[in-house]
Image (spheres, rainbow, N blue to C red):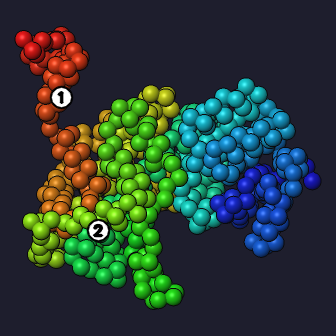
Amino acid sequence: MEGRCEIGVIGMGVMGQNLALNLARHGIPVCVYNRTAERTEAFMRERVREEPIAPAHTLEELVQRLSRPRRLLLMVQAGPAVDQVLEALVPLLERGDVVMDGGNSHYADTERRMQALAARGIHFLGIGISGGERGALEGPSLMPGGSPEAYARVEPLLTRIAARSEEGPCCGYMGRGGAGHYVKMVHNAIEYAFMQGIAEAYDVMGTALGLSAEAIAEVFERWNEGNLNAYLVGLAARVLRYPDPETGAPLVERILDRAEQKGTGRWAAQSALELGVPAPTLMAAVVARTLSHFKADRERIAAGFPWPDGWPATAPGDEVEALADLEAALNLVVLTAFSQGLWLLHEASRAYAYGVDRGEVLRVWRAGSILRARWLGFLREVVREDPEDPHLLFSPRFRAEIRDRLAGLPAAGRVLRLAFAHGIPMPALSTAVDYVLSMRRSRLPANLIQAQRDAFGAHTYERIDRPGVFHTDWEG
């Protein structure tokens, strides 16, 4: 039985199962393994029909079933579990074999593992996978990173199972080292901000405009026919329409307002701070999820902290105009989140010598990805205009989209006033506005901050009228 399978999949969670089925349904013989044999047997019994999938009950058996050079895909929980699998697996492999990590591993862990396996002549790739469980089965967006030689050995398999857009398979080489997992980390941070913006729009429509879940779903569906055409907008409409089987009321209204996170958004925020890249909207989305966990604290504070009577929740005026403003404001959040994420990718690629092509990243996200949206084509065109420009805001086309066609900033200002009148927090929108306003100011009040730093700590300062570094005795 040795050499019958072209790839081995380790980890039979839902994602691992669906990727194995996807591979097999594209004519690629697969061998599957899980630490607990019962899960492998259940998968073979309940989901495998005529697909060319063979079970293995030990890692030794798995390796023996694979044709050379061996190609293995790890779909285990990110963190120590990956190292544990590698510790047992690597002694069974040979020079030239390729191991792929398809989990949401930290990019620094991926680079560490890459170096350790390279010392033994074994290739290691970190692969970002987007699309969720359904995408894994029907066609995900794939973001592999590592050595070009390693990617060449698995490219034919990955491109066959990836989602497809009009530009081809949504799989592309992201760059050297931990680039694949870094790109996926930034993808998830943008996803956080996109979802937070949608949630804020939902809050304004329900709290300030008094719309029902059904009516809000209709608005999202209408927006999804325009610039905001995106998987996440359509998903929000679908979720809002789903009834609670027990009561018939919208299920979303029965869900506790506490959003979970697995760490990728937080890692992106940390990386942005380490690289000195301002990404306030991405960070605000992470903070919003963290704050949502303090449910008991929020309830206690809310009971004794009503919105002041001096700021009445006045009627918004014309609902059609308010919804048009809200649509423009959500577009602003989305474009700003992409702008910050792509800037972070640019700086990380330069700092870590990844060689990331941001236009290729956007192409790979066009289908299969949770971020798939109409805006991606436009953003790719902007990036292609000058790949070396870190900021989308350098592009006249990008600025015009925000300023003229969307009228994003004035609309966002009106939405923020409406939200403030009703006591609605808008972290994603407010930081998006602040980001654009800050980046368009040729002079910020940071001169006063630097003067104070020099006054209390002799941190020095620079002048606008002559070169050099200066210090003043501010008490003199």
Residue 425 to residue 364: above or below: below
Position of residue 57 measured from the top left corner of the image (x, y, whole percent):
87, 56
Q: Measuring from the top left, give residue 265's x and y in whole percent.
A: 45, 48
The answer, for residue 169, to whether it is visible in the render is no
**Horizontal and vertical percent position of residue 430:** 23, 53
Helix, strand or loop at mark 2: helix
Q: Is residue 92 visible?
A: yes
Q: How many marks?
A: 2
Amino acid type, label 1: Ile
Where is residue 372? Give x, y as percent: 44, 59
Above or below for 269 versus 318: above
Label number found at residue 303: 2
Give left or right: position of 343 versus 15.
left
Query: Which residue position is annotated with label 1?
Result: 449
**Residue located at (24% from left, 79% from top):** 210
As shown in the figure, which amino acid type bears the numbered disc 2?
Answer: Ala
Please tell me whether residue 352 is drawn above or below residue 467 in the rendered image.
Answer: below
Q: Give the camera-side residue of 57 and 377.
A: 57
Q: Is residue 340 above or below residue 130?
A: above
Residue drawn 44% across the image and 37% down it: 271
Q: Residue at x 42, y 82 (%)?
A: 250
The residue carrying pointer 2 sits among few (fewer than 14), some (14 to 19) or many (20 or more) residues within 10 Å by Cα, namely few
Residue at 34% in and 70% down: 224
Q: 216 left or right of 436? A: right
From the viewer's perspective, is 401 left or right of 136?
left
Q: Residue furthest right?
A: 1
